[in-house]
Amino acid sequence: MELEKSLVSGSMSLLVLKLLEDGDLYGYQMIAELRRRSEDAFRLKAGTLYPLLHSLEEKGLVAAYEQTAESGKTRRYYHLTKQGRDALREKETSWNAYARAVGRVLKGGACPAGA
Amino acid sequence: MQEQIRWKRARPVLIQELERHLEDQRDDLLKEGKPAEEAERLAVEDMGDPVTIGTELDRVHRPRPQWGLLGMTIALAVIGVVLRVAFRDVSEGPNTGLNAALEKALVSLGLGTAALLGMYFLDVSRLVRHARTVYIGSLIVPALLNTIHPYLYPHLYPSYLFTLTVVLYPLAYALWLYSFRGKGWKGVLLTILGGVPLAAVCCLIPSSSALFILLFSGLAVTLYAAGRDFFGVGRKKGLAAVLAVPAVLLAWLLSQGYLHSFLGRLKIALSHELDPQNKGFMGWMLHMFWKDVPPLRHHESFGAAIQAGVRVRVYTDNTNIFGGKLPFDYSSDLLPVSVAVHWGWVPLLVLLAALEGLFLWLLIKGLRQSYLPGRFVVLAVTLTLGLQTLFSAALNFGFVLFSASLPLVVGNFQTVLDMALIGLALSVFRGDSIAREEPEKPLRPRRRLRIKFEYQ
């Protein structure tokens, strides 16, 4: 299912930070992993990912380093910093609160007591 | 896309990462059985709109201007010019040497500003890529100049040029250290051995302050690196190995009796009255200078205050300390105390606080940079200049342990080097967002992706 762009873009930094929680990844891996975990719902473009990663790096939420693989390919890996981990916790909390609130509205609102 | 990125130095760095991404994607598409041409086309299409990508990257990657710190450095260097002129050599009379001193100081300010800006706009990663060449050059160039300079300037003492360039040694060592990233125990050993020729030059000059600054800053940078497992031998093992070096060195100095001699020197520095005629003479003399120095000495005007600087001899005549004959060059390392004597101790304290404040600020900011070799560079530069300021303050307050020139203030050529070092530290801050470390393993030759980014 193709998701509406505006729904995805607002939460993209949360998703990227979440991907890095389990280990360091390079850009191409992130796109593939996001696609796998979302069961093909999130098809992130490289042109969206890299400016986002670089701005997260600028804010100190991720750090990057280059490593050359056995194949000889050099990749720039991104690593979640402590500051990034804290930001992820905050973003997760506010996203969960937002998702619950949206869910309640879509279901017709909270039931009044005794109803 | 490239045209959207206004910072030209950022373009190749950013394009490289995107190219690698495209290569990965193309390779996966090839594995899926797509023909090579189609695989490349699909990879590019999947990238997104190049103009938007370029604009977004341009928004993130802009040089981080350091105009405030550049301005502060130049302002302090201008104060240095005023002080060097005001407290110039007046041995031929109170009104002599003005034009020559002013000319030299202004040329030094001009060259220093050019060096500051030149280094500020320099790409530090270029210096890092040629780290070993810089290290070897820092030993060979002064040695060559030293060989020829007796013919050019026979009045200068033999190690003169080494004395001037020794301020660059901590930086040369930091760059040398960086060239051994991930090289294991061999790297640890070669890093430490790299410090030996530099320390030997400091001993041959001889300059105990340069040696101490080199050893202290070298130890600090090496510990900083080992604490990040920079050599790949393990954090704790690396730290233990690096800490063992000063321990062994101290034990050796103790066995040779040097430590005892140093402690004797320290004792005299703390209590100059123990040997006022000999080793404690300078301390005793400075103690005389500091007698009755007010917080602020009143002068009729700024011009009169400047003029007061040239009355050193009159002052010494009046106080009858040396019968008008100064036992050392009053316009060099002891310039700060003359500021206190003629203008009061508050202006001197403000000057020292401004210098230490600048170097401390550079150090704190430097350690926050993401580019590791940049952090090494800033650490070496700020420790060098910060320790020089500290030693100069100690010397001028009468604690005579090391001779040291006050950065940006004392010495025309020295000021140019100081400004170049500060410019280099500022260039680290300026280019941090696009500074990239080389990968640890060398790239093997492989087929390059031929995708042109010049499409609209």
Image (cartoon, coloured by chain):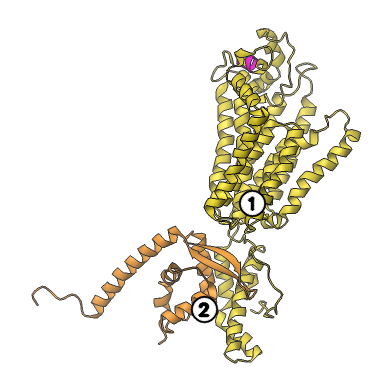
Chain colours: A orange, B yellow
Please tell me which residue lies in front, A70 or B367: A70
* Residue B284 lies within the magenta run: yes
Extreme-front residue of the structure: B255
Please tell me which residue lies in front, B235 or B300: B235
Q: Which secondary structure type mostly characterizes the magenta part of the structure?
A: helix
Q: Which residues are magenta?
A: B283-287
The residue shown at (58%, 84%) is: B28
User: Residue B385 at what x, y percent from top left?
Assistant: 63, 38
Say what amino acid the circle numbered 1 marks: Val
Give the number of the disc on residue B167.
none
Give the number of the disc on residue B188.
1
User: Residue B264 at what x, y percent from top left?
Assistant: 62, 21
Please tell me which residue lies in front, B413 or B401: B401
Extreme-left residue of the structure: A114
| Mark 1 or 2: the one toward you | 1
Quarter placement of the N terminus of chain B: bottom right
User: Residue B20 at what x, y percent from top left?
Assistant: 62, 75
User: Residue B185 at what x, y percent from top left?
Assistant: 63, 54
In 3D space, how far apart are the residues under numbered discs 1 and 2 (Cα atoms)? 43 Å
Determine whether the residue tagged by mark 2 lies in a helix, strand or loop.
loop
Determine whether the residue tagged by mark 1 lies in a helix, strand or loop.
helix
Which residue is labeled 2 in the image?
A45
User: Which quadrant of the figure has residue B99?
Assistant: top right
| B167 relative position to B17: left or right | right
Quarter placement of the C terminus of chain B: bottom right
* Residue B352 lies within the magenta run: no
Say what amino acid the circle numbered 2 marks: Lys
10 Å neighbourhood of mark 2: few (<14), some, or many (≥20)?
A: some
Name above or below for residue B427 compared with residue A86: above
Q: Tell me the subunit letter for badge 2.
A: A
Name above or below for residue B118 compared with residue A54: above
